[in-house]
Image: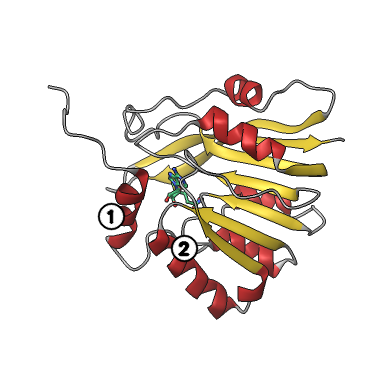
Amino acid sequence: MSDTRPKPTPEVFWEEFYGRGDRVWSGRPNPLLVREAAGLAPGTALDLGCGEGADAIWLAERGWQVTAVDVSATALERAAGHAAQAGVADRITWQRHDLGVSFPARPEGGYGLVSLQFLHSPLGLPVGRILRSATAAVAPGGDLLFVGHSESPSWKRDAHAEVHLPTADELLAAMGLPSPDWRVEVREPVRTEATGPDGEAGHRVDHVLRVRRLR
Ligand SMILES: C[S@@+](CC[C@H](N)C(=O)[O-])C[C@H]1O[C@@H](n2cnc3c(N)ncnc32)[C@H](O)[C@@H]1O
């Protein structure tokens, strides 16, 4: 039988999610962000769906000036606390947006890096619209990095059954690519061996797309 209850708003859903514990994520930056951003010259960065802030803090520790966005005020408050502990509070601005509704203002010149790391929601997200705003926010010479699940994990094949996980072609089309103004630097499915919540050995496969704005 289908669930006929009204869906919560993203704010209500993610507030409840982060309210379940003092820390939801590991506190470590996403390995594919580290792999892709370690070689970039620091500038300004935008982290969309920043959660508890580990990526923003890692970027700030490497000299980036970061704007980090999430729909959950609890996540942002926690992230700001972690940034203060790490001594990088002055390098990160936290902004609350429901990215399905509003998007941070583009600074003059744009961002050197716009990063989306597992910006997923069981409520669904207007991924095309968000990606168009994200590409528009990238400075000439800057990069957009998208990392996200391409399929449900092997231990729970219906984990993302309620939403469509876009293919790499769909993601690139949403970014307006191919285009002479952009170059695809990385387009790769990455398989990671991982353990499910009940200790099941398995794997997951994620998209890594890094595209550079040439002009
Ligand atoms: C799977 S978590 C990933 C968090 C973080 N990027 C990471 O990799 O640890 C998805 C994040 O996106 C945020 N999010 C979901 N829907 C959103 C929306 N409509 N607007 C802004 N943030 C949203 C959630 O609050 C959550 O922090």
**Figure check: 69 above or below 4:** below
| Residue 30 in picture, x, y percent from top left | 56, 53
Furthest toward the right, the residue is 215
Q: Which mark is residue 207?
A: none
At mark 1, the secondary structure is helix
| Residue 146 in picture, x, y percent from top left | 61, 39
| Residue 94 in picture, x, y percent from top left | 55, 63
Relative placement, left or right, of 55 versus 142 is left
Quadrant including the C terminus:
top right
Tell me the kind of residue under disc 1.
Answer: Glu
Tell me the kind of residue under disc 2.
Answer: Leu
**Figure check: 174 above or below 186:** above
At mark 2, the secondary structure is helix
Q: Which residue is drawn at 44% across and 68% down?
A: 77
| Residue 102 in picture, x, y percent from top left | 52, 44
Q: Which mark is residue 16?
A: 1
Residue at mark 1 to residue at mark 2: CA–CA distance: 14 Å
Q: Residue at x 63, y 58 (%)?
A: 67
**Figure check: 12 above or below 155:** below
Q: Which mark is residue 76?
A: 2
Q: Which residue is drawn at 60% across and 52% down?
A: 47
**Figure check: 189 above or below 98:** above
